[in-house]
Image (spheres, helix red, strand yellow):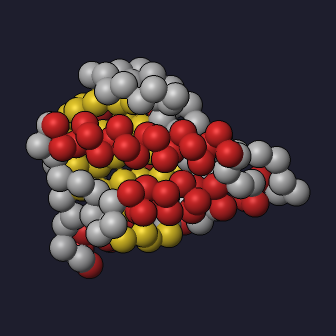
Amino acid sequence: MIVTIWRHGQAGSAATDRERQLTGTGTDDVGFGCQQFHEVCSERGLPHPEQVLHSTWVRTTQTADIIASAFTHAVMRPSTALIPGSSPADVDAALDELLSNTACPAHLVLVSHQPLVSRLADHYLGEYGKVPSLSPGALVTLELGVAAAGFGQLLFWALPPGYEAHV
């Protein structure tokens, strides 16, 4: 399975952290990132996302909506395993549950927050710092055999604003 870990786009201020919405820049960056991501997936023969699992907070839901809209067949699913304070073990459990109840998607996108997004990349790659810390709107794509530490293979990562794919 291909897994893309995507940090929400740049967000503004709000009365609570949970309510923060994407800024215009955040929306634009993620939209452009989707275009670049689509091209890279097509060029490399990778399947396009089928599911977008996202934190229940506003900015991650907005980011997931942009991604799902760019890949019209992608289904959005909220997950409390991706909210701030969650751990890679929480995400592993959520993925195990998802995969045991549904057909395994060829490509799954996880939309979450820092520090979880970078911790997930390190967790699945089994190595700290193989990918730079994910800034708002950044992504990393892995091939994941099992939702467990060290079972991922890095395919590429990309950061806004240019979203050039790096290995």
Q: Is residue 81 shown left or right of residue 100?
A: right
On screen, residue 152 versus residue 159, left or right, reads left
Residue at the extreme left? 45
Task: Say which quarter of the image contains residue 59.
Answer: bottom right
Left or right? Give the position of 45 relative to 74: left
Count of numbered badges drawn on the protein: 0
Q: Residue at x 59, y 48 (%)?
A: 27
> Is 102 drawn above or below residue 32 in the view shown?
below
Q: Position of residue 100 (x, y in %)?
A: 23, 73
Q: Is residue 83 visible?
A: no
Relative to 156, does residue 112 appear above or below in the rendering? below
Tell me what residue is drawn at x 51 percent, y 44 percent.
30
- Spot occupied by residue 72 in the image (x, y as percentages of width and height): 33, 66
Residue in the foreground of this view, choosing between 161 and 78: 161
Q: Is residue 159 visible?
A: yes
Residue located at (84% from left, 54% from top): 14
Taking the spot 17% from the left edge, 52% from the top edge, the residue there is 47
For this view, does 124 lie left or right of residue 68?
Answer: left
Name the one closer to the observer, 23 or 125: 23
Q: Residue furthest bottom?
A: 101
Q: Quadrant of the C terminus?
A: top left
* Residue closer to the observer: 67 or 152: 67
Using the rendered view, name the quadrant where residue 57 is placed: bottom right
Q: Position of residue 78 (x, y in %)?
A: 50, 69
